[in-house]
Amino acid sequence: MRLFAPLCFCLFFVLIALSQQAKPGEQPSIGGAIAQKNLIVFVPPEYPPLAKSAAISGKVRAEIVVDQLGNVTSVQLLSGHPVLAAAGISAIRKWKYKPFEIDGKPTDIRTEVEVSIPADIDKDEQRREDKFQEAFWSNKRAGDDALKNNDLQLAKSKFEAARAAAEERGDSKWLSLCEVITSLGNISFKENDFAGAERLYKEALALHEKHQRPDEAEVAGAQQRLAFLYFQMGRLEDAEPLYRTSVETYEAHIKEIGLPEPEADYGRNLALGYFALSQIALSSQRGALAREECQKALSFAQRWSGSRDRKVIESTCGTMQSTN
């Protein structure tokens, strides 16, 4: 009891001081180490299968709001690998705290929390992982920024550095490797080096197919990138089976997904995939099939595609429907 009482006494005055600093309408903020002492229900995060297969581990940090009953009512991601973030947030939402008090009255508070995924990360492995994450993501972000600014040479050098960091960690970093290989393929595409883009897109697709089931959405995405390249090159006989397989996969996944962001992404890919299939069918004088694919493209475009995509699809498919 003599150990517990000073802690409560200290926490009481910390909360009072912070409540005086909080702006009207805002919850007082307290340090994570102090807040952790009130944590009474800890739910460990699940290790996402994709993260596990790709050997992705690390910490997810978030700012949370705890209400007067000790429930977590708000979780805002501060940092963490994108593949781990959802699992970390999902677990944190289920935590329960002993209510925090100011002047003897329960109060909402704001604090920061951190959780490791998986929970039992080896310290040496974590150091290696931290080194990789720093090298990979700093170069990946710099490459993305350079690509947006159309500085292709700088982007290429940054993506190559990110690729080297992923390859140094071995086969376990296949997913990160896929990302930068695809980005390098995008640069080759922009440079009209279609042979180089084909080689890189095929390399990324092969990695996905090696580590994932053929009906995974990530595999479909890699197939559709390669299909689009073939479409642009006029190699329609190569593009068609890839587009066909990818839309079948996205159709299956969009029916089971419950989250708005991936649902919109799948929907847009379906709109563009079916539109490409309609144009391929039209070029080979399969009018009935072209109209059927156009109708599917329209149905997805009206709900999920961006305005530019939607206008092109509506204009082209609308003309096709009116002339038949």
Image (cartoon, grey):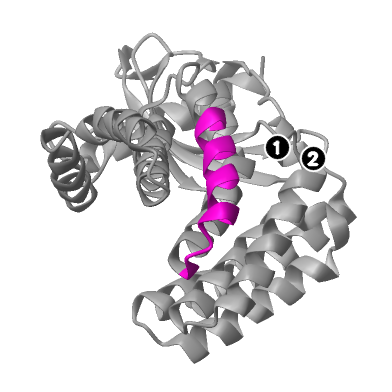
Residue furthest out toward the front: 285
Overall secondary structure of the magenta section: helix
Most foreground residue, 165 or 212: 212
Residue type highlighted by circle 2: Ser
What's the mark number on residue 53?
A: 2
Q: Residue 1, located in which quarter of the rendered image?
A: top right
Q: Residue at the location (36% across, 41% down)?
A: 278
Q: Which residues are magenta?
A: 233-249
Q: Residues within 10 Å of mark 2 (few under 14, many from 20)?
A: some
Image quadrant containing the C terminus:
top left
Tell me the SS state at disc 2.
helix
Instruction: Look at the image and tell me whether residue 8 can be seen.
Output: no
Q: Position of residue 283 (x, y in %)?
A: 38, 52
Instruction: Look at the image and tell me whether residue 146 can be seen.
Output: yes
Q: Position of residue 137 (x, y in %)?
A: 59, 66
Residue type highlighted by circle 1: Leu
Residue under numbered circle 1 = 50
Q: Residue at the location (54% across, 82% down)?
A: 193
Q: CA distance from mark 1 to mark 2?
A: 5 Å
